[in-house]
Amino acid sequence: MYPLAEIALSAIFVISYIFWPIELSDLISYSQFAVWLCALVLMCILFIYDLRWFKLPFKIVNPLIGLGVVWAILDGVQQGFSSGLIINYILGILVGAGVFQLLYSLSSGRWIGDGDIRLGFAIGLFAGSPLEAWLVIFTASILGLLLAAPSVLKTKTKRMKLKMPFGPPLLLALWLCVLFGAQIIEWYKVNVLYL
């Protein structure tokens, strides 16, 4: 698993560089990309940890949140700390963490773990807006459904208890949405909403 993880992380770094949505032209943009690469290392650790032990440990999620805060500050420096930008980040965090907090509260922790709530906080920071935070959650749900489908189809009992970690689909969706989120949203507006 570990050599595969190292190869995958290297590929993710290269793909992130090729499809990076922000022009790398000054110190701030290069710093934001460096923060993203550091976040990818933590995301890779969380991906593997959650796959193996069904847990997103705070000691890894909290530094990811810290990198998300640095990311948001650098974005603010780049775009200007307008009230609209700040509100977008706050709403992104509310969507990212709020959805998982609601699920956690409704199920008393049976449907989702408390690590997902903190990961949702990081998702809100890296997404930077409520729309992109929703896109991450929606994409992760589709990915999770695709991953669970073979097990669901194999189970013949009426009452099925399928346990699968949601962290890996969330992390993969976050990576995809940071790189391609703006294009996905634009495609949706043009082709589905006809705006």
Image (tube, rainbow, N blue to C red):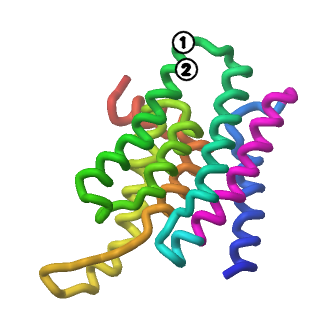
Q: Which residue occupies 70% across, 45% down?
A: 19
The relative height of residue 87 versus residue 23 in the rendered view (above or below) is above
- Does the stretch in magenta take in 34? yes
Please tell me the numbered disc located at residue 25.
none
Label 1 Cα crowd, 10 Å radius (few <14 / some 14-19 / many 20+): few
Q: Say what secondary structure mark 1 lies in.
A: helix
Horizontally, is 164 left or right of 20 in the view?
left
Above or below 183: residue 114 = below
Residue wearing tag 2 = 86
Q: Is residue 164 visible?
A: yes
Up-down relation of residue 26 to residue 5 (above or below): above
Label 1 and label 2: CA atoms lie apart by 5 Å
- The reply to whether dot 1 and dot 2 touch (C-beta < 8 Å) is yes
Magenta part, dominant SS? helix
Q: Position of residue 4 (x, y in %)?
A: 70, 77
Categorize mark 2 by other alpha carbons within 10 Å: few (<14), some (14-19), many (20+): some
**Residue at the image point whose x is 73% and y is 20% from the top:** 77
Amino acid type at circle 2 is Ile
Verify whether residue 109 appears in magenta: no
- The quadrant of the picture occupied by the N terminus is bottom right
Q: Where is residue 165? Give x, y as percent.
A: 44, 69
The secondary element bearing badge 2 is classed as helix
x then y, percent, for residue 28: 81, 28
- Residue at mark 1: 83
Residue type, numbered disc 1: Ser
Q: Quadrant of residue 91?
A: top left
Q: How many labels sit on residues?
A: 2
Q: Which residues are magenta?
A: 25-48
As drawn, is 29 to the left or to the right of 134? right
